[in-house]
Image: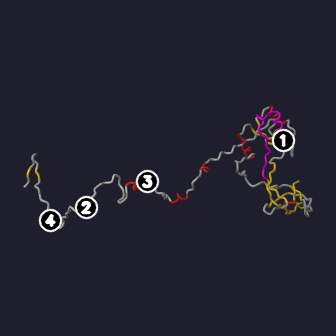
Amino acid sequence: MSSTDDFGAAVAPDVPAPRPDDPEAGPDVTFQTDAAEPIDTAVDDEPGDAGEPAGDADASAEVPDESPADPAAADVEVLSEDDLLVAEPVESPYDRPGRWFVVHTQSGYEKKVKQNLEARINSMNMEDRIHEVVIPMEDVVEFKAGKKQVVQKKMFPGYLLVRCSLDDDAWFVVRNTPGVTGFVGQGAKPSPLPRRDVETFLRVKQEGEELPRKGKARLEYEMGETVRVKEGPFAEFSGEIVEINEDQLKVKVLVNLFGRETPVELEFSQVAKL
């Protein structure tokens, strides 16, 4: 029978706990004796795998997976500091102080005239107005003793390029240099070169870099050019070049034989310029 406490609430009657050896307790009831080991209900401060300290769990959680997520990432090349350095652009000769002018000289004396002009610039203290004197050069293929070789030759024989801030004094110094015959231009007024021509004639290169060529080196002989035969059965004959075979080092020349133009195949070493 239930009873009430001092506040009037119902209180459940005390029921004696069944004894372990009580046959009426039923098969589903499990009893724990005083000899049983106490169950550790303590909870770790931080979660971790069973049997593993919490500190180890944190350490394993913080280690990133070193295997790349994308297989292609393993093939990516790692750039060094030197690779990331951007090369400075090459300065265009056109952007230097002053303008470029073409000066006509005595053919074959370009180097001597250049030396004379540079000496006059120094002696007359004109360095601030006449900045640079250049003989433009180009690569040319020549054939000597049956061998092909590339040599440097003057791009415009009989001409110099002069970079200056042209005024009356600068004109006087250049024009009155021994070997100079005049400026190139329309009428009496010198004409400065446009950017395209300056950058074509005066190509520059970066330090440690080969000078890029715009194409194959120019051959010494050209189609339609008249040459003289130096040796062989047609020695001292002259004729026009109608074919050039660079691989076999030969040219085909139209030679006048008995009033008829006959094509004759000759080696490069057998002909010469007129």
Estimate the spatial distance between the alpha carbons at disc 2 and disc 1, rounded to whole Å: 111 Å
Query: Residue pushed farthest top?
Result: 168
Please name the residue that numbered disc 1 is placed on.
115
Please name the residue that numbered disc 2 is placed on.
37
Tell me the kind of residue under disc 3. Glu
Of the numbered discs 3 and 1, the one sitting upstream in the chain is 3
Could you tell whether 182 is left or right of 64 in the image? right
Estimate the spatial distance between the alpha carbons at disc 4 and disc 3, rounded to whole Å: 53 Å
Could you tell whether 125 is left or right of 38 in the image? right
Q: Nearer the viewer, mark 3 or mark 1?
A: 3
Indicate whether 4 appears above or below 242: above
Query: Residue pushed farthest left?
Result: 1
Q: Are marks 4 and 3 in contact (CB under 8 Å)?
A: no
Q: Position of residue 154 (x, y in %)?
A: 81, 48
Q: Nearer the viewer, mark 4 or mark 1?
A: 4
Tag 2's secondary structure?
loop
Q: Write down the quadrant of residue 225 in the picture.
A: bottom right
Please name the residue that numbered disc 3 is placed on.
62
The mark found on residue 61 in the picture is none
Q: Nearer the viewer, mark 2 or mark 4?
A: 2
Please name the residue that numbered disc 4 is placed on.
25
Q: Position of residue 120 (x, y in %)?
A: 83, 36
Crowding around mark 1 (Cα neighbors within 10 Å: few <14, some 14 to 19, many 20+) is: few
